[in-house]
Image: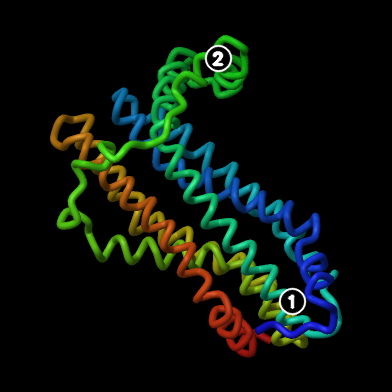
Amino acid sequence: MLIYHLREGDFISELFTEKLIFIALFILIIHCIETLAYAVRLSGARVKLLASALSLFNLMVMVSRLANMMQQPFTGSLIDKAPKENTLEFVESQFRIIIASSTIGTIIGILLLPTFIAIFSRAIIHLAEERGSIPSLIKKGFTFAYIKRGLKHIHLPKLSYVKDIQLKDIPVKLFIINMVITAIYTIGVLSALYAGLIAPERKATAIMASGLINGVATILLIIFIDPRISILADDVINQRGSYSNLKGMSIMMMTSRLFGTLLAQIFFIPGAHYVAWFTKFIV
């Protein structure tokens, strides 16, 4: 149990600061966007415009990566504002709240999947009509008529949405790899910041290691995960595979992401100690 010199009520008020809530919402949105990125390939295969879909996919990935970079200084400031007593326990509690927000964001992304497949399908068609102009697409998408039309597509997933998915069709190895990579990506920045508290004499080195951790996780996603989904999407367009198989794989990967954010809670502290240990060989 966390021991702190303030009364319980004071501790909670100190813990849940406006900045922490802001960061948690930021992380929630980031993970929601990254989860919904799977909907883009589904939409591309659905309307048989995969290349145009990949343009939107790359845009979403860049937005989420930029947002992730923007939140890092704010997350680091939580350490600067942490109390001098029981700093490790206090920061750990705040960071676990941030990790939990990534789980909530992933769940929201999963629930919004049917809605965004419908919206992205139309966005891809409009992107093709605009000859690949993203600014023109955004300008058109934010008109009242298109917003009103988009609201009609909002609906939650039904049980029938996953009726064709069978456990025997789930590639367990790929599921576990994606789960582990997601966990590493989720705690990359947080573990590096926490490692700076564990080894304050190597604080700067530990913090800078976050870019390496996230970079490696991103490369692993590109090597092991993205090609499999892309091949399935190509098979659907070329009539060598079924849309239900692609949908099943995408839902499986989204579920794997969800478990990855839960696994991040377990990896967080060991990951911080590993980063602190690794910095000894750099300094």
Read off the residue under disc 1.
90
The quarter holding residue 156 reads: top left
Q: CA distance from mark 2 to mark 1?
A: 45 Å
Image height of 24 relative to 96, above or below:
above
Image height of 74 relative to 110, above or below:
below
Mark 1 Cα shell of 10 Å, populated few (<14), some (14-19), many (≥20) = many
Q: Quadrant of the C terminus?
A: bottom right
Read off the residue under disc 2.
148
Q: Quadrant of the N terminus?
A: bottom right
Residue 265: x, y in percent? 53, 71
Mark 2 Cα shell of 10 Å, populated few (<14), some (14-19), many (≥20) = few
Q: Are marks 2 and 1 in contact (CB under 8 Å)?
A: no
Image height of 19 relative to 148, above or below:
below
Residue at image point 39% right, 50% down: 254
23 vs 18, nearest the viewer: 18
Which SS class for mark 1?
Answer: helix
Residue at image point 53% right, 43% down: 33
Residue at image point 49% right, 51% down: 106
Residue type beneath disc 2: Lys
260 vs 12, nearest the viewer: 12
275 vs 105, nearest the viewer: 105
Residue type beneath disc 1: Phe
Image height of 251 relative to 197, above or below:
above
Instruction: Using residue 86 as the reference point, say whether residue 188 is left or right of it.
Output: left
Which SS class for mark 2?
Answer: helix
Instruction: Using residue 235 as the reference point, say whether residue 119 is left or right of it.
Output: right
Residue 189: x, y in percent? 63, 66
Residue at image point 43% right, 57% down: 258
Residue 166: x, y in percent? 18, 51
